[in-house]
Image (cartoon, rainbow, N blue to C red):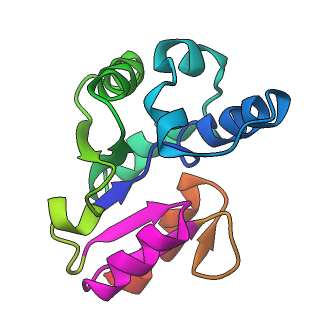
């Protein structure tokens, strides 16, 4: 079974760092803000959430795993890809332009998406996929990528 995992807010705490910077600089979350982020600098400040890459390695024995992440700019995509490659040189990474839904880039039907953004989960489910909200109570919820192993029996 195909398992897609979001990057921001699921593997790495980019959203937490972005929220801190927005608050410190009294800025709003806008497309323009995201297009001007220096992703190399941002990712140096970020932490991996719950040993995500170790957990992904375990998940790869049960699923066909890929990272499915939205990007605003090519520079963001390159920075994310280089970051991921430091931890896993063979992990499939799919970069999705921000204005296109993830389900338009890959086939959601009968595939799992782990994401922290409600709209991505709603769209995924609408398109026949299994959506798992990362760290929220509105959907099947996990706090660690390793938790997905507890749900494997649901899809076997």
Confirm whether residue 2 shows in the render: no
Q: Quadrant of residue 101?
A: bottom left
Residue 149 part of the magenta-drawn span:
no
In the displayed structure, 40 sits above or below 5; it is above
Left or right: 5 as drawn, with respect to 12: left
Left or right: 67 as drawn, with respect to 105: right
Residue 122 part of the magenta-drawn span:
yes
In the displayed structure, 125 sits above or below 97; it is below
Residue for point 49% across, 64% down: 149
Horizontal and vertical percent position of residue 130: 37, 79
Horizontal and vertical percent position of residue 94: 23, 43
Residue for point 42% across, 68% down: 120
Left or right: 30 as drawn, with respect to 65: right
In the displayed structure, 110 sits above or below 99; it is below
Horizontal and vertical percent position of residue 134: 59, 62
Horizontal and vertical percent position of residue 41: 56, 12
Q: Quadrant of residue 109?
A: bottom left
In the displayed structure, 41 sits above or below 104; it is above
Q: Quadrant of residue 78?
A: top left
Q: Dividing the image into 4 quarters, which one contains the N terminus?
A: bottom left
Q: Nearer the viewer, residue 111 or 37?
A: 37
Q: Dividing the image into 4 quarters, which one contains the C terminus?
A: bottom left
State the extent of the magenta-drawn residues as a range.
111-133
Left or right: 35 as drawn, with respect to 97: right
């Amino acid at each position: 079974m195909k398992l897609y995992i979001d990057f921001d807010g699921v593997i790495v705490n980019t959203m937490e760092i972005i929220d801190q910077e927005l608050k410190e600089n009294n800025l709003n979350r806008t497309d323009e803000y995201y297009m001007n982020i220096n992703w190399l600098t941002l990712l140096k400040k970020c932490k991996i959430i719950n040993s995500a890459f170790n957990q992904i390695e375990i998940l790869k024995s049960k699923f066909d795993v890929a990272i499915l992440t939205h990007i605003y700019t090519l520079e963001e995509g390159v920075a994310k890809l280089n970051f991921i490659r430091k931890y896993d040189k063979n992990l499939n990474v799919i970069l999705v332009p921000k204005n296109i839904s993830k389900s338009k880039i890959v086939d959601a039907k009968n595939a799992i998406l782990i994401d922290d953004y409600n709209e991505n989960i709603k769209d995924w489910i609408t398109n026949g996929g299994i959506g798992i909200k990362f760290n929220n109570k509105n959907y099947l919820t996990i706090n660690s990528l390793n938790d997905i192993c507890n749900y494997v029996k649901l899809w076997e």
